[in-house]
Amino acid sequence: MISDIIKEGINGVPSIPGDKSISHRSIIIPSISNGICEVNNILKSDDVLHTLNAFKAMGVNIEDHKKKIIIRGRGLNSLKESNNAIYLGNSGTSARLLTGLLSSQKFKSVLTGDNSLSSRPMKRITDPLSEMNAKIYSTNGSLPITIESSKLKPAKINLTIPSAQIKSGLLLAALNIEGETHIIENKTTRDHTEIMLESFGANIEIQKLENRKIIKVFGQKELVPNNIDIPNDLSSSAFFIVSALINNNSNITLKNINNNPTRNGIILALKKMGAKIKLFNNRTNNDESICDIEVVSSNLNGCELGPEFADLMIDEYPILAVAASFADSPSVFRGLKELRVKESDRLNLILKNLQNCGVNCKSKNDDLFIYPSKNYQIKNNLIKTDFDHRIAMAFCVMGTKIGPLNIQDETSINTSFPTFKNELNNLGGKIS
Ligand code: S3P
């Protein structure tokens, strides 16, 4: 796929798909509720379809319409053993959340994934689950894993890695444990699971002290069904926001975007860089914050972001690094260790690909330094992605400014945003 220069800017109202994190949870939680749930605006991307198919394989009746699904929940304890291993493709969220959920079911499960997912760490979820008496066997700490049926016991778990996937996997396990489980989080991570569980009547109690949060789960209470309208995805929006910021004569509006404060670091970071971004029509739906966003071309300045930003925007560093390459001063983004264990080693690919585009940048102790310049001489226009959707989309946006760039393995974009190419082209991008 080749992403090329835009001469007239990025303009219009792109159609952004439903939020990926909330879409996964909108299949998992209704499936273990006690009744019928209608879920609107679900993202039908490869990752989410893997979660959907997993629950169909475990006996959940899911009626599939275009952007809507209707789920007939089976209750906390009534999923069925899948006839085959459950294949989760590239989806880390499916893998971590299902490992937690299935460790407290009464049957054996086997989870598998693609090459990228099979090289990602699973001990971060299986170790704390073992403290709850889960019986999980992995291949050197990664997928494939086998989850044996086991009676879990309540525990007090202190999360050492800031990860919503780990937290959510543990919460899903705790729902089915008799007694009181505590999950203690020391840094903020996205809280979609807690929000949705509360709206499904789970017996959970949350205590907050600055970034520290104790979630108490009183297990074995059946969940009551609820309908869900999924807001559009801020992480997917970020590619359009940065396209508009860095290309002259741009003006875009993004509608119905999730603006959850545990997730909106990219907006705060870009505003710190002088971006002209206006959030309006602020509202709430299903207890999630939502807004519309207007973005116009902007002269960006560089900035320094501390590690606390990584907790609020870990998925957005590839596209933020592209934005920083067009600022009028250097940037440093600190504390990016977790970027190394995403769908690819993202820190490494950001550096390598920016350097191929002619950008002066380096990393030191998991901090990323970018020294922008006015003109870039592309050294190698082949962008290596290691099948990572966010690297592919970030460098499509880079191509809109300095192109043409040749993006390897572009089908990875279907992981989260199957309509990305058409949407960007509709707004003035030139991706062939
Ligand atoms: C996600 C959590 C994040 C994020 C991922 C989606 C989720 O991972 O990177 O894309 O839906 O819970 P971690 O929580 O492991 O950082």
Image (cartoon, grey):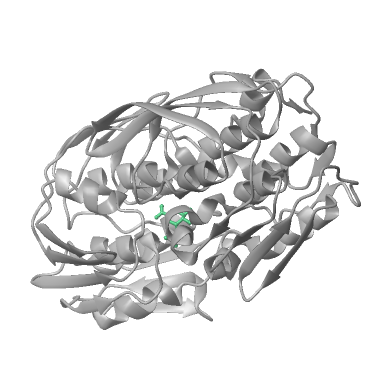
The image position of residue 262, as x and y in percent, is 35, 51
Q: Is residue 86 visible?
A: no
Seen from the viewer's position, the closer of residues 300 and 47 is 300
Q: Residue at x 38, y 37 (%)?
A: 258
Seen from the viewer's position, the closer of residues 336 and 432 is 336
Q: Residue 404 appears in which quarter of the rendering?
A: top right
Q: Residue at x 77, y 35 (%)?
A: 401
Tell me: 432 left or right of 381: left
59 is higher (above) or lower (below) than 178: above
The image position of residue 55, as x and y in percent, is 34, 48
Tell me: 115 left or right of 215: right
Q: Residue at x 71, y 45 (%)?
A: 328
The image position of residue 315, as x and y in percent, is 52, 52
Q: Residue 361 appears in which quarter of the rendering?
A: bottom right
> Splitting the image into four quadrants, where does ligand 1 fall?
bottom left
Q: Is residue 71 visible?
A: yes
The image position of residue 59, as x and y in percent, is 29, 47
Tell me: 226 left or right of 128: left
Count of marks overlaid on the render: 0
Seen from the viewer's position, the closer of residues 67 and 399 is 399
50 is higher (above) or lower (below) than 228: below
135 is higher (above) or lower (below) than 274: below
Quarter of the picture containing the C terminus is top right
Quarter of the picture containing the N terminus is top right
Q: Residue at x 23, y 46 (%)?
A: 196
